[in-house]
Amino acid sequence: MISIIEKYFPDLTDQQRDQYRALYDLYADWNSKINVVSRKDFDQLYLRHILHSLAIAKVCQFEARARVLDVGCGGGFPSVPLAIMFPDVKFVSADSIGKKITVVKGVCEGAGIKNIDARNVRVEQIPEQFDYVVSRAVTEMPTFVKWIWSKIERGQRGSLPNGILYLKGGDLKEELAATRMRWQEYNISDYFEEDFFETKKVVYTAK
């Protein structure tokens, strides 16, 4: 299971390996109570959810103490895999559905992930600012930008200037053009060779 993570991230610490390894049983247990990962592709958890989330880590390396907001985190993707990868970064995982946040809190507790603050809240109600906002196909990009643009602080707390890093698939030209902002598209297939990633992207814009 974890071998697919080690394939692309060979420098993991023993603690990171243990935490990634723990995710399977933790999600299996929680998923039997609260369905946050599609049951039909649960056996693909490491490929379709954990490794997919970590595509963001290939595009941008966050600095220690950077602040990252995961909007509409669901069961904790991409923030849970990213929090293991960047243990010195502060993550806020936000979702308006309370039972999903229950899962995130339970998984973090079980895996010993201490750098996630999981909140059952609408993103508009979050008062503070962040260096980066991450998300996985929560809504159309113009709507998403409206929700979060004021919450990003200018600067650079990683290998890219502060901004949005969004996991999306397919042809995004029209949707991105509608925001009237400049976006960079990173093909995940440039980093990971599995067929699943063929049409998947990380889209980025700087504040």
Image: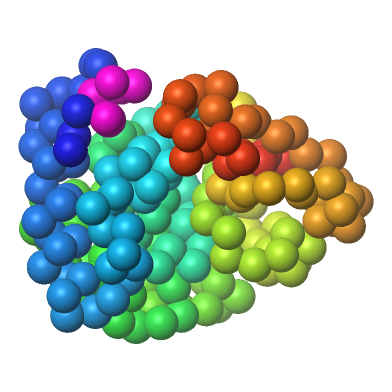
Depth check: 107 or 154 in front? 107
Depth check: 123 or 43 in front? 43
Determine the main secondary structure of the stretch shown in magenta: helix
Residues in magenta, as a range: 4-9
Task: Tell me if 160 is positioned left or right of 150 in this view.
Answer: left
Task: Tell me if 52 is positioned left or right of 159 in this view.
Answer: left
The answer to whether any part of residue 117 appears in the image is no
- Residue for point 43% across, 30% down: 194
- Residue for point 81% across, 50% down: 176
- Total label count? 0
List x then y, in percent, for residue 180: 90, 51
**Which image quadrant for residue 7?**
top left
Task: Tell me if 156 is positioned left or right of 74 in this view.
Answer: right
The answer to whether any part of residue 45 appears in the image is yes
Task: Tell me if 38 is positioned left or right of 140 in this view.
Answer: left
- Residue for point 38% across, 78% down: 120
List x then y, in percent, for residue 181: 85, 46
